[in-house]
Image: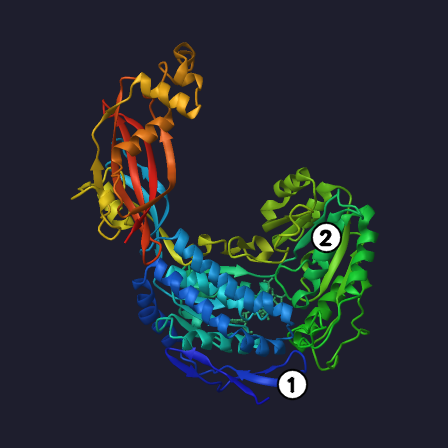
Amino acid sequence: MSLLEISSYAAGDWVKPGAGARNIASAVTGATIASAGNDDLDVQAMLDHARKVGGPALRKLTFHDRARMLKALATELGKHKDALYDLSFHTGATQSDHMIDIDGGIGTMFVFASKGRREMPDGHVYLDGDVEQLSRTGSFLGQHICTPLQGVAVHINAFNFPVWGMLEKLAPTLLAGVPAIVKPATATCYVTELAVKIMLDSGILPEGALQLVSGGIGDMLDRLDCQDVVSFTGSANTALKLRNTPAIVENSVRFVAEQDSLNASILGPDAAPGTPEFDLFIKEVSREMTAKAGQKCTAVRRIIAPEAQVQAVIEALSARLAKVVIGDPRLETTRMGALVSGSQKRDVLEKAALIGTEAKRVFGDPENFAVEGADAEQGAFVPPMLFHCEDPDTAVHVHDTEAFGPVSTVMGYRDLDHAIALANRGQGSLVASVITHDPAVARAVALGSGAFHGRLYFNNRDSMKESTGHGSPLPHMVHGGPGRAGGGEELGGVRGVKHYMQRTAIQGSPDILSAIGDKWVPGGTEIAAPAHPFTRKYSELSIGETLHTAPRTVTINDIEHFAHFTGDTFYAHMDDAAAKRNPFFPGRVAHGYLLLSFAAGLFVQPDEGPVLANTGLDGLRFMKPVSAGDSIKVRLTVKKKTPRNEEYGEVRWHVTLTNQDDELVAEYELLTMNAF
Ligand code: NDP
C-alpha cells in the first residue's frame, strides 16, 4: 500500500501534508501507512470561512431543512461503508468494532435527522419551555427561545472512534445551524478524512459548513470568541490544558469535555451464580473489556461484586476471556484486534503495571499470549488483563488510573452502601451499570450514585433481550459525566443540539412573542378567518386565524343522555346531593368529555375537505364546572403549523371553551393533519 497523504479541508480547498507532518503507523503491522499535518494551515482563514460563509448559509435553512440534510448525509455515508471498513482495519478495529464506530455513527446521524423533524419546528427559532405569564392580564409575557450561535464549533476528537466520534458531534451541531471544524486524533485521522470526503463530495452541505484539520490545529483555539464552542473528547490532561487556553477563559467560550472515566459495573446482591443476572453480568463485562480492545470511553474498568461472589466472578470472567481470539482484525475468527498504536500499547502496559501495585493480575499475561494472523511484536496487541484488588478501600490507582485498553479490576463489596461508595470513588464517570432484578437495589444505587454518573444502566432477565449494552452511548440519551469524566454532556436528543445554541429569555406582548416564535400566543391578535378554517388548506391557513362559534346551552337531558349512552354515570353528573358534598361542584355538572364533544360539534365543518385526521389533544384542562342551563361557546385559533411531508402537515389549534359569562371552562390544543 502506498503512503496515504491525509489532507485537511480548509476554506474550500484540500491542503496536503506539508512542513511538520506526522507519520501514522498501522496498528496491525506497525508499518507507516500515512502522513498528516501541515504547519502552514491558515487557521484564521478556516475560522473566517466557517463564520462568514458556512454559518450564514446554515442559518438560512430551517431545522427541518437541516434535519433532511443530516438524513441525506447519513444515507450517503451508508453507501460507502465498505470503503470505510476497509480503511478502518488499519486502526486495529474488527468488523464488530466497525459496527459501533461506522454503523453506529451513521445511525446516530439518522436519529438526529428524525428528532429534528419530529421535535423541532420547521422554522428558525426553537421554543424552550412554555410561555410564562409575567403580568396580571397577560399583556406582558415571557418565553425562552434558542437560536444558533453565530460562530463555529471546533470538534477535537479522540482516536478510538474516528467516525462515530465525529458524527455524534456533527449531527447536533449542523442541526443547530452551526458550522464545524473537525479535528480528529492524528492516529486514526485517515478514516475520518474519508468520511469527510464522502460528505463533502455529495454536495449536500453548504460551503463552509464542514472543514477538517488533519494533524495539528495550530493556534486556532487562541482565536475563538463567545460565539464559538469547543467540543473535546480525549484525555483529562489535554482537556485541562485546552480549557485553560487564555482566549477560551477570557471569552467564556463554551468548552464541552468528555475525558477519562473509571466506569463501574455492579453485580447486585441478589445476582448469585445460577441466576440469569450473574450470567448476564459476566457477558456484559467481558464484552465491555474486549470491544475495541477496551479503547472505549464507556468500557468497564471496575467490576464491583459482593465479596461472596468475587471468586465466582473471576472464574467465570477468566473462562470467557480465555475464548477471546486476538489477532488480525480482518480475520473473521478474530474477536479482539490491536490497540491503536505502539505508543498506546506502552501507555496501557504502564498503567496496568501501576494498577498491578494494588491489585493482583488474575488473567492475561502481556508477555505470553497468542496472536492469530499478525506479528505480535510489530502490531499493538495486548491480551485482556483482569486484576483483583483485595482492599479497594485503601487502593487509589484502581479508582483513578484509566488504562485505555482491555484492562479491568474486580473488587468486592460488603453491602450495597459499600458498593455505592466504591462506584463513587471514580470521582465522576460516564456510566455505571447495575445488574440486578431487585428494584429496591436499583433505587438505592440511583439515589446514592446518580450524582456521580452521567448514565446509570440497569439490566436484568426482563430487559436483557432488548437492552442496548452498558457501553453504548445512545443518541436519545445523555452521554457525558461529572468530575473526572469532563463535566460535559453530549447527545441526549434535542438537549445535545442546544449546546450549539444560545438560550435567550424573550419578554414582551403576546403579538411580539407570537411573531418571534412563529406560534400564536393567547392574548395575541386574532385574524378573522375568510372562510371556515376546516375548508382551508394547510398552506392557506395563517397563524392566528380564528373561528368563534355560536353558543350552545347544555341541558339536564344532554347530561342524562351522555351518561347512559357512554356508561359514565359518575355521581358528580348523576347525583345532585352527592355532587354538592364535593368541594369542586355546585351540584350535578356536565361531563368534561361531553363538553369536548359539544365543542367539536360547534367548530367542525362536516364536509369532506382538507382536514384529514384528528391526531390528538394536548394540555387539556377543565377550569370551571358547567351545570345544566349554562351555555358554552368555542374559540378555535391556528396556533402552529408543522409540515410533515409534501402532502400534508400538522396544524396545532388553540381551543378555548367559555361560558355565558365569558369565563374559561376548558382549554386545550387540538392536533389535526391537513392537506397542503
Ligand atoms: P489526547 O488527549 O492526547 O488527544 C485527544 C485529541 O486532542 C486529539 O485529537 C489530539 O490530537 C488533540 N490534542 C492533543 N493536544 C492538543 C493540543 N495541544 N491542541 C489541540 N488539540 C490537541 O487523547 P488520545 O486520543 O491520544 O487518547 C489518550 C488517552 O485519552 C487515552 O489513553 C485515554 O486514557 C484517554 N481517552 C479517554 C477517552 C474517554 O472518553 N474517556 C476517549 C479517548 C481517549 P492529536 O492526535 O493530533 O494529538
Q: Which mark is residue 521?
A: none
Point out residue 598 in the picture as x, y percentages from the top left corner: 30, 29
**Which-is-in-front pick, marks 1 and 2?**
2
- Whether disc 2's CB lies below 8 Å from ligand 1 is answered no
Left or right side of 568 for 269: right
Q: Quadrant of the C terminus?
A: bottom left
Q: Which residue is mark 2?
A: 281
The residue closer to the viewer here, 369 or 255, is: 369
Point out residue 412 in the picture as x, y percentages from the top left corner: 78, 49
Above or below residue 32? Residue 279 is: above
Point out residue 386 in the picture as x, y percentages from the top left corner: 77, 62
Q: Residue at x 58, y 54 (%)?
A: 483
How dense is the environment of label 1, judged by Cα within 10 Å: few (below 14), some, or many (20 and up)? some
Amino acid on which disc 1 is placed: Ala
- Classify residue 316 by image quadrant: bottom right
Left or right side of 110 for 535: left
Q: Quadrant of ligand 1?
A: bottom right
Which of the marked residues, 1 or 2, is nearer the chain's N terminus?
Answer: 1
Above or below residue 53? Residue 123 is: above
Q: Which residue is mark 1?
A: 31
- Residue found farthest to the top: 577
Amino acid on which disc 2 is placed: Phe
C-alpha span from label 1 to label 2 = 38 Å
